[in-house]
Image (tube, rainbow, N blue to C red):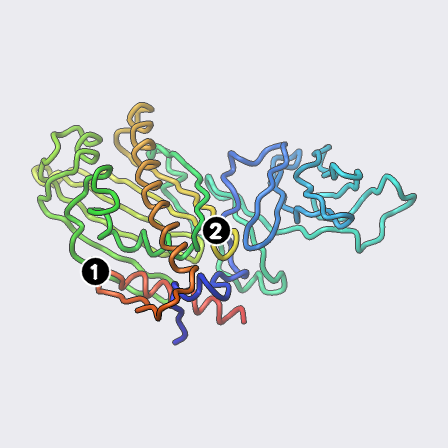
């Protein structure tokens, strides 16, 4: 079975498949203003047509390579801000102001398939001839469930996307990276790991474990109150992972658990940079003030992850003068290792 060492892959060859659906934006970001974004070494411009659907084109005018996102949207036509070349939502060049007649076909730009599902806009930047064989974007039913309060956020991180994927598959870093923010100290032993054909999931149960202050506050009980928690995290595709936490009051086992969900969508910009889209939701403590407090804590904690991952990337990108000891793994890395193998299979299919 082919696999790869992340420390080596973030120095060397591309380790993300093109033939995959990736998150391009939140739906709330895409409107009647042109949105330019780099993804998978590709410049993309996103916009909404007049009928409300999302379109995506290569963000590069074929004339002098000006970003189309610096231009204007007129109806469903993108007008380049440099020399006024105009492109339809299908990428065809429909007008060149300095040229009479219909523009030649080779003046068109690429257009990319998109799907808007829940809060996310997905894009396919791979080989169009095999798109029907590629797994569709994973779905997050809770993100469209009215019983959940939902918040979203976006970060740009100067690190390879796989570093974050492994970060959220091994939560034993909580007691160190997030010691003063999340204050979750009982993630000290490896979880159980369940491996599927194209997915991997970890699962860990905490019985009568004292609640961290953030957990306790949202559940309306004093910090340190013993509650049961079940954590699950699933690698759904190279583009998306999901984390689930269910809280159960041990004195009221007949009640439905309180549910917290988080989605981690990592879209490579290039080999050493990523867009990190996160979505959080819960079906308790849903008032705006409580959700604002949650978002503040999450942003603070995720920024701690960013600092660590960027430091790892900087270290891995250098070639040391002395021979490096390389990378070693432990049992807590089991889910991350399986994720590497799944991504390697995606890469093999593409090759």
Tell me the residue at 39%/67% (across/down): 321
Q: Are marks 1 and 2 in contact (CB under 8 Å)?
A: no
Quadrant (top left/top right/bottom left/bottom right) for the C terminus: bottom right
Residue holding disc 1: 192
In the rendered structure, the answer to whether residue 106 lies left or right of residue 164 reads right
Q: Pick out the residue farthest to the right.
A: 100
Residue holding disc 2: 273
Tell me the residue at 90%/44% (across/down): 99
Tell me the residue at 49%/57% (across/down): 271
Rendered location of residue 134, percent (x, y): 52, 62
In the rendered structure, the answer to whether residue 337 lies left or right of residue 344 reads left
| Above or below 83: residue 13 | below
Q: Identify the mark nearer the N-term, 1 or 2.
A: 1
Element type at mark 2: strand
| Above or below 145: residue 14 | below
| Above or below 211: residue 232 | below
Mark 2 crowd level (few <14, some 14–19, many ≥20, 10 Å Cα): many
Q: Quadrant of residue 228?
A: top left
Give the number of callouts.
2
Rendered location of residue 174, percent (x, y): 23, 47
Between circles 1 and 2, the one closer to the viewer is 2
Q: Quadrant of residue 344?
A: bottom left
Q: Which mark is residue 258?
A: none
Rendered location of residue 108, percent (x, y): 76, 51
Q: Nearer the viewer, residue 293 or 179?
A: 179
Q: Nearer the viewer, residue 347 or 135?
A: 347
Element type at mark 1: strand
Quadrant (top left/top right/bottom left/bottom right) for the N terminus: bottom left
């Amino acid at each position: 079975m082919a696999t790869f060492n992340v420390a080596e892959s973030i120095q060397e060859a591309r380790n993300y498949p093109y033939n995959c659906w990736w998150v391009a934006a939140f739906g709330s970001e895409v409107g009647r203003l042109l949105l330019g974004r780099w993804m998978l070494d590709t410049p993309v411009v996103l916009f909404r047509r007049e009928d409300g659907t999302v379109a995506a084109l290569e963000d590069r005018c074929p004339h002098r390579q000006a970003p189309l996102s610096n231009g204007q949207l007129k109806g469903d036509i993108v007008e380049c801000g440099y020399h006024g070349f105009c492109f339809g939502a299908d990428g065809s060049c429909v007008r060149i102001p300095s040229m009479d007649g219909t523009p030649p076909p080779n003046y068109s730009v690429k257009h990319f398939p998109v799907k808007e599902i829940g809060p996310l806009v997905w894009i396919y930047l791979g080989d169009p001839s095999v798109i029907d064989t590629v797994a569709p974007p994973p779905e997050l039913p809770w993100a469209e469930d009215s019983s959940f309060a939902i918040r979203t956020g976006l970060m740009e991180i100067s690190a390879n996307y796989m570093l974050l994927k492994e970060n959220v598959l091994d939560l034993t870093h909580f007691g160190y990276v997030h010691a003063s923010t999340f204050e979750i100290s009982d993630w000290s032993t490896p979880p159980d790991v369940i491996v599927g054909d194209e997915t991997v999931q970890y699962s860990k149960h905490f019985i009568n474990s004292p609640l961290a202050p953030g957990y306790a506050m949202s559940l309306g009980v004093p910090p340190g109150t013993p509650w049961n928690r079940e954590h699950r995290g699933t690698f759904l595709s190279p583009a998306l992972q999901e984390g689930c936490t269910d809280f159960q009051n041990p004195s009221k086992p007949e009640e439905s658990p309180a549910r917290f969900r988080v989605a981690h969508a990592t879209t490579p910009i290039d080999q050493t940079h990523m867009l990190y889209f996160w979505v959080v939701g819960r079906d308790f403590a849903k008032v705006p003030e409580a959700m604002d407090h949650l978002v503040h804590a999450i942003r603070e904690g995720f920024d701690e992850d960013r600092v660590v991952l960027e430091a790892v990337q900087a270290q891995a990108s250098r070639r040391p003068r002395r021979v490096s000891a390389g990378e070693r793994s432990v049992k807590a890395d089991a889910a991350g290792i399986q994720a590497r193998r799944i991504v390697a299979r995606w890469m093999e299919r593409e090759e």
